Image (spheres, grey):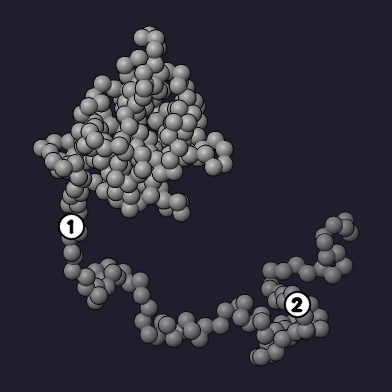
Amino acid sequence: MLKKIIGGAEKSRFVLIVDNFKHKKNKLLQCIIKSYCTRFDQTHLVCYSRITSKLAESVPHSSEKLTIHDGYTDPMRWEGATKDHMIHHDTDMYQYLSTKYNKENQAVIIDDMNMLLARYSVTHVYNMIHCLLNGTISGSPVFNIVAVVHNELLDETMLNTLRHQASSVILLAGAEEGRATCDVTHRRHSGKVIREIVTYTVTDSYEVQEKSEAKQNKVATPQDSTVDPLSGLTFSLGLSDKEKEDRKNLVLPYMRMQHITVSHEPPGTVQQVAPGGAGEGPQIFYQPTREDDIDEEDPDDDLDI
């Protein structure tokens, strides 16, 4: 799944990478930069950290498809003059990119979203990403986005907001001996959510090679279809053939009531059963017993006579 997202086999407009101090994003981000420069007409690398040159190593310096925007050197405009491809704290990201670069197929890679979240509210950053993804007006340029956040420097509310907005979340888990592990959650346009634990390596040519996780082998237990779960009990839960036949021939009281014919005999007379017969319309059948106290003069027993 990780390789499909980077290579474009699985379409994802907004990829969020969550790294930590044990597993940093540099190697994976270099692979994404190389892949995006191949897939898109123009790729914008917005750098808020000082490792700009290392991130761009995967792409030849002569490539015109990669533009690096410096957001680290002078974020507060202390140096005065604004140089080309320099971003400040008050720069409108969408306005800045859409005005200078009006190509149809573009991507934006932000190497450190924590710097933006430190300066602006999470609502402001959310709206900025929304404008980049969808544009401000009909026909305006839209961008695909890859953004990196550091897990240790964000609270749960901010992180959940970005995770909700992203179509793919890559949670970097750990790295050792040249092998790294990440938790990939991808949401397709249909709404289906796919989650995988991926172990991968990065080659010298900045290509991602996935290594399938060792699946837990299920222990094959011999299934004996002749096993009787009732065997070995000290009592019987089953019925013999004779008991089944007796149960089948047993006539229950409610079955007799279904065949009773309406009788106009005086109370206390047992009504006769007419096999196959039935009264007209719904009937209430009552069979008196010896304990019944039938008094026709005072049926409700409410008169003091």
Q: Is residue 190 left or right of residue 70?
A: right
Q: Quadrant of residue 88?
A: top left
- Residue name at image x 24 percent, y 35 percent: 62
- What is the three-letter code of the residue carrying label 1? Asn
- What is the three-letter code of the residue carrying label 2? Pro
Residue 164 can be seen in this image: no
Q: Which residue is mark 2?
A: 282
Q: Quadrant of the C terminus?
A: bottom right
Q: Is 241 placed above or below 48 here?
A: below
For the residue pair 73 and 197, the one nearer the viewer reads as: 73
Disc 1 on helix, strand or loop?
loop
Q: Position of residue 251 (x, y in %)?
A: 56, 83
Q: Position of residue 280 (x, y in %)?
A: 78, 84
Q: Is residue 170 left or right of residue 249?
A: left
Residue 248 can be seen in this image: yes
Q: Which residue is mark 1?
A: 217
